[in-house]
Image (cartoon, grey):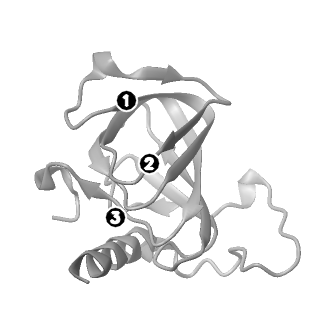
Amino acid sequence: MRTRLLIAAIAASLMLPLMAAEDRYRGDGHMMITPDKLHWGPVASMGQGAEIAFIEGDVSQEEPFTFRLRLADGYRILPHVHPAYERVTVLSGTLHFAHGEEFDKDATRKLPPGSVAIMPPGDPMFGYAEGEVIMQLHGTGPWGIEYINPEDDPRN
């Protein structure tokens, strides 16, 4: 029970900046949107240098979601886990990504545009952006993020 509440709280904090985005897909009919029409905002769970644009769904609910992350050049994704599968497609820039509980730049794998990564629930990961990176994530909620080292969490 406590874990489900933590996941819901994390998911809610991830969404807060974009709750007003009424053009998010809700499952009715077709949705077609060009990149210039996405609404970008800060990501409370990632801090300065990361922005998010929700496309569909509510990560705090048991439903499909899709969103994009935009990371500034050099942005470090500190070691963390998610409660559900994470599916990432790199759209632009180069994402360097790895499995593990400690950040190690040399352990990462270079993922250029078009690359795909799938990580299972609870599997620790980390990475960094080379150039501005835009990646699309999708999965099924509830979803959130928990840092391996709580001091790395910008919400603390």
Q: Tell me the distance, in whole angstroms, between the alpha carbons under discs 3 and 2.
A: 23 Å
Residue 76 visible (yes or no) = no
Dot 2 amino acid type:
Pro
Residue occupied by mark 2? 120
Tell me: residue 106, above or below residue 4.
above
The tag earlier along the polypeptide, 1 or 3, is: 3
The residue beneath circle 3 is 44
Residue 138 x/y as whole percent: 59, 56
Question: In whole angstroms, how far apart are the C-alphas of marks 1 and 3?
Answer: 23 Å
Q: x%, y% of residue 52? A: 51, 58
Q: Position of residue 104 (x, y in %)?
A: 24, 24
Q: Tags 1 and 3 in contact by the CB under 8 Å rule?
A: no
- The answer to which image quadrant residue 134 occupies is top right
- What element does badge 1 sit on? strand
Q: Which of marks 1 and 2 is nearer the N terminus?
A: 1
Nearer-N-terminus badge (3/2): 3
Q: Which of 32 and 58 is in front in this view?
A: 58
Tag 3 secondary structure: loop
Query: Viewer-proximal residue, 115 or 19?
Result: 115
Residue 107: tell me if it is visible. Answer: yes
Q: In which quarter of the image is residue 57?
A: bottom right
Q: In which quarter of the image is the N terminus?
A: bottom left
Callout 3, which amino acid? Ala
* Numbered label attached to residue 98: 1
Q: Which residue is found at the position 25% from the left and 75% from the top?
A: 3
What residue is at 40 percent from the left and 60 percent from the top?
43
Looking at the image, residue 65 sits to the left or right of residue 41; the answer is right
